[in-house]
Amino acid sequence: MDVYMARQPIFDTENHVYGYELLYRSNGKQNSYNGVNGDESTADVVTNAFFGLNINDIIGGSKAFINFTSNLLKRGVPKMISPDLVVVEVLENLMMDDQLLGACQELKERGYTLALDDFEYDNSYSELFELGDIVKIDFRTPQKSIEETAYICRYCNKLMLAEKIESQEEFEYAKRLGCSFMQGYFFAKPTIMSKSSVTPLPLNLMRVMQLVSQPEPEFSDIVDVISCDTAMTQRLLRLINSVYFGVRNRVSSISQALVILGLDYLREWIYLMGMQRITHIDNVEVMRISCLLAKFCRELALMIPEAAPDADSFYLMGLLSMVTYGGERALKQTLDEFPLTQEIKNGLMGNGGIYSDVFELAYSYEKGDWETVDKYVEKYHLDSSKISEEFVHCVKEAENIRMM
């Protein structure tokens, strides 16, 4: 499945990129918003940016401007993203109530930048206006409205972002009004970004949503479900690497990844994934092969004394086996997005060592490359009949996984 989104650059008055607004796109042909449910479109933007694509490739060292609905603001969804990465856009037409204002106030206290989108000053929005750091002024609205809002912003020392700038004259006019940032077709149209990505199987996603919705979910049950879904595993790893913890944390097992993320954050990200309306089941076979190799790598590791203590790490390596199909260059780029231990990366890239040997043995056995299999059987003094027995057992387990 291909995932899509668009980005449009936001410039300062010196034509330097300050950030990118991330926009919902349903396909690679229609470069416009098609009016789907706001919660769903924001969920698509956030999950595609941080799961399907690499957020660092999208925004570089700048910030992502993302529009959040009232529902998502009240749920605290923006808090799942570092304030160093995101500018939280709040639409003027949201129904203001104490809960929504409280959510915005908490974001401010946590160091988030708030941008008020399509804003025209009105006394009924005075409390929200006070919380805003950046006011986005739509240059397709009447000139009187633009100038009145700009006057209030200058008086209250609010930064202004002129959006929908379409000409040099509008650009110069925005600068005279005191706008610090600019956005519009005069500078650049939104650019569609896409990437082929496996998506969680609907049943697996439903099961893990049921588990995390319980007041005191069983941690091991969550691990078991995610361990059967290479897409959820890849999304989890990419999330940890890009959003919270960077390269300082190296993951060697799924349970360790979940501990790093924490149950509260996991609940919210699973909630967002569930809003994507995932219905594709064309990657079932990919899931089965990944689960088979994961189980088989773990069983092979248990047969080798020096590998046995880290059997869960070998399982994770096998579960990520499908990333090896994109070629060596694509593989290295993809693995850089995952906070994996170097041993697991070496194994997937075939760089030598016991992880590489176990992965090649498992992969060769599944493909029927008996010459390579015999080489590693001899190297590690393994019992061929036991390997065959465990392989058959792993095949049966993988086939019994409830995929659909």
Image (cartoon, grey):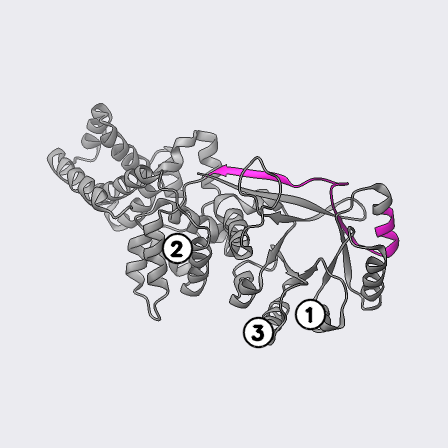
Left or right of residue 366: residue 46: right
Q: Nearer the viewer, residue 328 or 103?
A: 103
- Up-down: is 154 above or below 36? below
Specify few, some or many for label 2: CA neighbours under 10 Å numbering under 14, 14-19, or 20 or more. Answer: many
Left or right of residue 254: residue 118: right
Q: Which residue is mark 2?
A: 257
> Would you identify the image quadrant in which residue 326 lies?
top left
Q: Quadrant of the N terminus?
A: top left
Magenta-drawn stretch contains 221: no
Q: Is residue 304 visible?
A: no
Total marks placed:
3
Specify few, some or many for label 3: CA neighbours under 10 Å numbering under 14, 14-19, or 20 or more. Answer: few
Closer to the N terminus: mark 1 or mark 2?
1
Closer to the N terminus: mark 2 or mark 3?
3
Magenta-drawn stretch contains 175: yes
Measuring from the top left, give residue 112's x and y in whole percent.
63, 63
The residue type indicated by label 3 comes to Gln
Measuring from the top left, give residue 201's x and y in whole percent.
35, 47
Residue, x 81% and y 62% (percent of image)? 149
| Segment colored magenta | 172-196
Furthest toward the bottom, the residue is 98
Per the rendering, the mark at residue 128 is 1
Q: Which residue is mark 3?
A: 99
Camera-near label (2 vs 3) is 3
Q: Nearer the viewer, residue 197 or 385?
A: 197
The residue type indicated by label 1 comes to Leu
Q: Nearer the viewer, residue 80 or 278?
A: 278
Tell me whether circle 1 and circle 3 mark residues in contact (CB < 8 Å): no
- Mark 1–mark 3 Cα distance, whole angstroms, equals 12 Å
